[in-house]
Amino acid sequence: MMDALYPLMIVTPKQVILEETVRSLVAPGEIGSLGVLAHHAPLMTTLSAGRLSVVLASGETKIFEIAPGFLDVSRERVTLLTPSADEQGH
């Protein structure tokens, strides 16, 4: 489903780590993993330190190790704010 995509920005105080159109993400929520697909209900939540998995529009999966932060899901986009996000692999 090509329409099941949404824009994601991962932002640290120093730089934009990722700005891509994605299919999904799984983030480390405070009470467990939190998955976000297209058309998710608007939400603002805190995140714990841990593993963030992002599936890009191409189908490629990127994994990041993130510090505690915030996830903002709006109707237009998803924004993840964190002090640090280090891509794993590559």
Image (cartoon, rainbow, N blue to C red):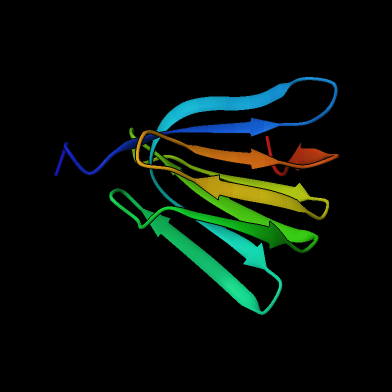
Residue 38 on image: x %, y %: 30, 48
Give the tally of numbered discs: 0
Q: Quarter holding the C terminus? A: top right
* Residue 77, picture quadrant: top left
* Furthest-bottom residue in this view: 31
Decide if residue 20 is on the left or right side of residue 31.
left
Name the residue rendered at 85%, 21% in the picture: 14
Name the residue rendered at 70%, 50% in the picture: 70
Decide if residue 4 is on the left or right side of residue 23.
left
Decide if residue 13 is on the left or right side of residue 81.
right
Q: Quarter holding the N terminus? A: top left
Q: Of residues 64 and 71, which is closer to you in this image?
A: 71
* Furthest-top residue in this view: 15
* Residue 85, picture quadrant: top right
Residue 41 on image: x %, y %: 36, 57
Name the residue rendered at 77%, 64% in the picture: 48
Name the residue rendered at 63%, 77% in the picture: 32
Residue 58 on image: x %, y %: 33, 33
Decide if residue 33 is on the left or right side of residue 35.
right
Q: Of residues 76 and 84, which is closer to you in this image?
A: 76
* Residue 57, picture quadrant: top left
